[in-house]
Amino acid sequence: MIINKKIHNVEISNLERVNKLLLKKDLDANILIIDQNLKSNKYIKKLINKFGPRCLLIKGQEKIKSLDNYCTYIERILKIGVQRKSKLISIGGGTIGDFAGFLASSLLRGIDHYMIPSSLLAMVDSSIGGKTGLNSKYGKNLVGSFYLPEKVIICPELLNTLPNRELSCGFAEIIKYSLIKPNNFKKRLLKYDFRKNSDLISIIKYSIKTKIDYVDDFKEKSSHRSSRAILNFGHSIGHAIENSNLYKSNIKHGEAIALGMLIELKISEYLGHYNKPIDQTINLLKKFNLPTSYENYLSNNKIKKLMQKMKYDKKVSDNYINIICIDNKGGFIKKLSFEKLEKILTKII
């Protein structure tokens, strides 16, 4: 199945077919970056063996998205040899895709990037829309570019390699779509049957189409409800939680976003925009084994630290930050001063 809209080229396929396509040509020109957690997969093994030194194995995690790592791998790839016809093919989760995408965008001023996401979060979110990025000690994805992959190939069987915790992280972004664009999707998630593979593939397709509806606005400058900025729901606070925790594994990206969504939903409620029971969203997060308690990150003595992290957010302008709030129509942009936001946070904890 091909999901195409304008310049976003997304295909749902299977790993055997993809494997055959990658082994057909340009083995001496293309570069392969693979999450080393996938190296035991029989199809991945074939790619590793065939590409040899042109295959780089990297452990997917937020810590790889650093400027030091970027310099190391740029030099490695240049030493191996790269040409304008070369393609950088990445197979892995969101951190691999973000990192590989930024490498591709800057190698020879840009070579084609083919992305094969292996995590649910990457399939439904980070692989769609062309964002690439590195982290700074001051915040997440503060160095990066908009660089659309030539193609995104979704192979749902790769989800079989994931631990349950990683699957849950992907559902955080899926739940986000049900809140920013309300329809019957939330009911579908509440009725979701973990035993039916067809349910998951259907949800992946819907999530991809939903994100594509938002991502034509590359710079996030518009303020309307279809703006790409609406996809940041849960992320301003979620990224601050991740960064204040130094990207340690005790809280993963999807888990931080789940907490960020819950907090931003309570901000929406406090400001009088959201008047539905928040318990339904809490139950949805719990169903997919996502955290609902944020006291370790938003206690009275930690609010100032969190606020300090948020001041480096990409959505900051002067002393204001754009928070995505939710009302009965879905997501919209709310401009808040840091002073007001801090006061609200002390009220809702």
Image: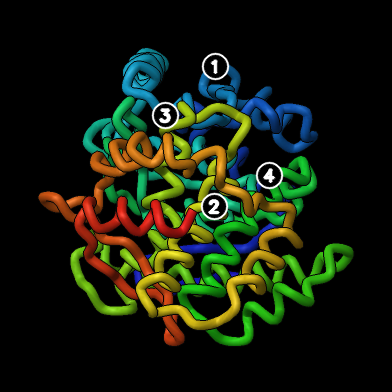
Instruction: Give the CA distance from mark 3 to mark 2.
Output: 22 Å
Instruction: Give the CA distance from mark 3 to mark 4.
Output: 18 Å
Instruction: Give the CA distance from mark 1 to mark 3.
Output: 22 Å
Residue 29 appears at what percent x and percent y? 44, 30
Mark toward the viewer: 2 or 1 = 2
Q: Is the residue marked by circle 2 packed among few (<14), some (14-19), or many (20+) residues within 10 Å?
A: many
Residue 191 appears at what percent x and percent y? 78, 77
Q: Can residue 17 be seen here?
A: no
Instruction: Give the CA distance from mark 2 to mark 1.
Output: 41 Å
The numbered mark at residue 53 is 1
Q: Earlier in the sequence, mark 4 or mark 2?
A: 4
Mark toward the viewer: 4 or 2 = 2
Residue furthest left as drawn: 318
Q: Amino acid at mark 1?
A: Pro
Q: Secondary structure at mark 2?
A: helix
Mark toward the viewer: 3 or 2 = 2
Labels 4 & 2 near each other (Cβ < 8 A):
no
Q: Which residue is mark 4?
A: 166
Q: Which residue is mark 3?
A: 65
Q: Which residue is mark 2?
A: 259
Q: Amino acid at mark 3?
A: Lys
Q: Is the residue marked by circle 1 packed among few (<14), some (14-19), or many (20+) residues within 10 Å?
A: some
Q: Earlier in the sequence, mark 1 or mark 3?
A: 1
Instruction: Give the CA distance from mark 4 to mark 1.
Output: 29 Å
